[in-house]
């Protein structure tokens, strides 16, 4: 089972190494990792998707809380997540319209066009990014750049 968590940490050099080192030492696999500053420039937010059962998720949380630069660790249960991907696809005059149609169908944007390629941007769920990749694969994908998943807890309706 995949678990999404965020970690608030002090923003200084070497902190990410401490976090990933913990995962490595404990044998926990990181499926996805994204890091960025928060509204407070001295604090970074690390979003990690890790694979394992509930026990593994609890162990990760406990171990992370022991690290000095860690301010807060939260396992996200009810959350919204997105991933950004840039996909460069082979295209010619004949295939260009088809590729553009696929992009439109998947709510993706064409961000660059050349004589031989189209580059598409998508910001969506991991499943939808995977679907777009599979739909574009027959045209010949030249390059893919994907971010890690970012996530935020849903607000409870009251």
Image (tube, grey):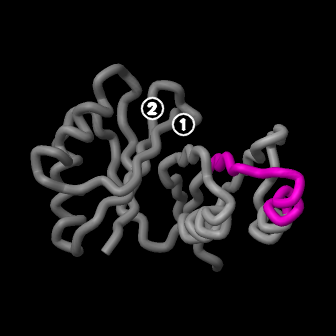
Q: Position of residue 6 (x, y in %)?
A: 40, 52
- Whichever of labels 2 and 1 marks the residue nearer the N terminus, that label is 1
Q: Are marks 2 and 1 in contact (CB under 8 Å)?
A: yes
Q: Residue at x 61, y 53 (%)?
A: 141
Query: Gap between marks 2 and 1, in whole Å?
Result: 6 Å
Mark 1 lies on residue: 38
Residue 114 falls in image quadrant:
top right
Q: Residue at x 45, y 32 (%)?
A: 43
Residue 80 visible somewhere in the drawing: no
Near-viewer residue (124 or 64) = 124
Horizontal placement of 64 versus 97: left or right?
Answer: left
Q: Position of residue 41 (x, y in %)?
A: 52, 26
Q: Secondary structure at mark 2?
A: strand
Whether residue 86 is in magenta: the answer is: yes
Near-viewer residue (152 or 24) = 24
Q: Which residues are magenta?
A: 85-100
Horizontal placement of 29 versus 120: left or right?
Answer: left
Q: Is residue 118 above or below residue 39?
A: below
Residue 152 falls in image quadrant:
bottom right
- The disc at residue 43 is 2
């Amino acid at each position: 089972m995949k678990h999404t968590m965020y970690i608030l940490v002090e923003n200084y050099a070497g902190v990410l190494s401490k976090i990933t080192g913990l995962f490595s030492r404990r044998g926990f696999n990181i499926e996805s990792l994204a890091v960025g500053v928060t509204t407070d420039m001295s604090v970074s937010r690390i979003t990690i998707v890790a694979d394992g059962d509930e026990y593994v998720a609890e162990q990760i949380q406990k171990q992370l809380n022991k690290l000095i630069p860690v301010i807060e660790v939260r396992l996200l249960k009810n959350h919204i997540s997105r991933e950004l991907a840039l996909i460069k696809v082979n295209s010619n005059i004949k295939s260009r319209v088809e590729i553009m149609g696929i992009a439109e169908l998947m709510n993706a944007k064409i961000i660059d066009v050349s004589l031989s390629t189209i580059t598409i941007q998508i910001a969506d769920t991991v499943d939808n990014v995977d679907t777009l990749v599979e739909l574009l694969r027959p045209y010949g994908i030249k390059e893919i750049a994907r971010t890690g998943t970012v996530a935020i807890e849903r607000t409870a309706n009251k």
